[in-house]
Image (cartoon, grey):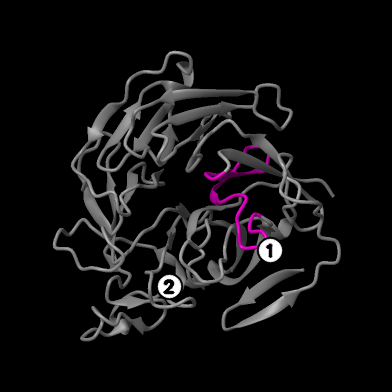
Amino acid sequence: MGVVRFKGFRLAWALAALSFAGHCGTDGSGIKLPPGFRLTVYTDQTPGARSLALGDDGTVYVGTMNEGKVYAVRDENRDGRAERVVTIATGLNMPNGVAYLDGDLYIAEISRISKLPGIARRLDDPPKPETLYDAYPKDVHHGWKYLRIGPDRKLYVPVGAPCNICNPKNELYATLTRLDLDGKNLEIYARGIRNTVGFDWHPDSHELWFTDNGRDWLGDDQPPDELNHAPRPGLHFGYPYCHGQDLPDPEFGKDKRCADFVPPAWTFPAHVATLGMHFYTGTRFPAEYRGQLFVAEHGSWNRSTPQGYRVVTVRFENGKPVADRVFAEGWLQPNGKASGRPVDVLPLPDGTLLISDDKRGALYRIDYQP
């Protein structure tokens, strides 16, 4: 049985034919999906797989954290499984974020944005990364970065708070920044963001949406993780003063009004660790999924009963989120241990969906065949 969550209440979503079998094996069995969907392993040769980016020719670029590597992954015979995995960069400082445009791959490390020029033609002889910008803070705490190129052809780069909860003097912390493709003209696009590791632009409005991880140590069930909407630059989303819709921080929110900040457009359960997200624009999945948001929940690390470790969908109507429901789950075992941790999602040109898993070092492919 799946669960649909509407603003303000929960509702059981009856699905009599959810397909799953056995434990979570190497073939993807054990992951529960809606009827007609099937999960297979695209590759299990990408240790620490984190953020994903798609090249013009179908190559999938994969960032990592502790591995310090970036991979290029190719399904060359179009059979739904990648036969070729190439390491195209090594020795980097948590190269979590990757973004692709016009044959070049952009990489986000802790304090540096670099580029692999012409990588699409040089997988077997990759160039050395060219530094574009290297003045981001060097803090490891929330220092790993997501990376996307917006509709304005600018690089969007988050700078997480260097702590669980604090109010640092450096104005770059707890922000989302953007800069030109050559690394120039850095500006702060949005403030009050504790740690976003996933964002995308709505396919119709082209407005920015992003996930944000709530702070720790306020209990098992608060504050929530957030889905935020930033249709224009200059907005402040509350951190470290307010969390969720209207929860003042016990240390930093005493003299603040939550109404003075932009509230989340949608909230997720506390500690599920919402990371990568992507609007689905393909046509392979049923019509109800088109234009909807897929979000990877990496899973809680300090909750008494673990939760997350799944992929959810957020349903949009008239440009606004109205409900969410579990799409893929089963990485969290009944004993509370996890066999995998979803990080990012990426629709492919054929309409299938990839999910990265940094615990198993794998990419999964979800197809729909009614």
The image's mark for residue 344 is: none
Q: For the residue marked with disc 2, what is the amino acid?
A: Pro
Q: Residues within 10 Å of mark 1 (few under 14, many from 20)?
A: few
- Residue reaching furthest to the front: 335
Residue at horizontal 36 percent and vertical 41 percent from the top: 153
Q: Closer to the N terminus: mark 2 or mark 1?
A: 2
Placement of 86 over or under 160, stated as above or below = above
Image coordinates of residue 132 in percent, x first then y, are: 25, 33
Asked whether residue 238 appears in the rendered view, the answer is yes
SS at circle 1: loop
Asked whether residue 292 appears in the rendered view, the answer is no
SS at circle 2: loop
Q: Is residue 175 left or right of residue 99?
A: left
Q: Residues within 10 Å of mark 2 (few under 14, many from 20)?
A: many
Residue at horizontal 31 percent and vertical 65 percent from the top: 164
Taking depth in this image into account, of 233 and 121 the one nearest to the observer is 121
Q: Is residue 15 left or right of residue 178?
A: right
Question: For the residues carrying marks 2 and 1, which lies nearer the camera in this image?
Answer: 1
Which residue bears the numbered disc 2? 264
Q: Is residue 266 magenta?
A: no
Image coordinates of residue 255 in percent, x first then y, are: 20, 86
Q: Quadrant of the N terminus?
A: bottom right
Which residue bears the numbered disc 1? 334
Q: Is residue 6 left or right of residue 25?
A: left
Q: Main secondary structure of the magenta part?
A: loop
Mark 2–mark 1 CB contact (< 8 Å): no
Q: Give, as a single range, the part of the protein colored magenta.
A: 331-359
Residue at horizontal 25 percent and vertical 30 percent from the top: 131
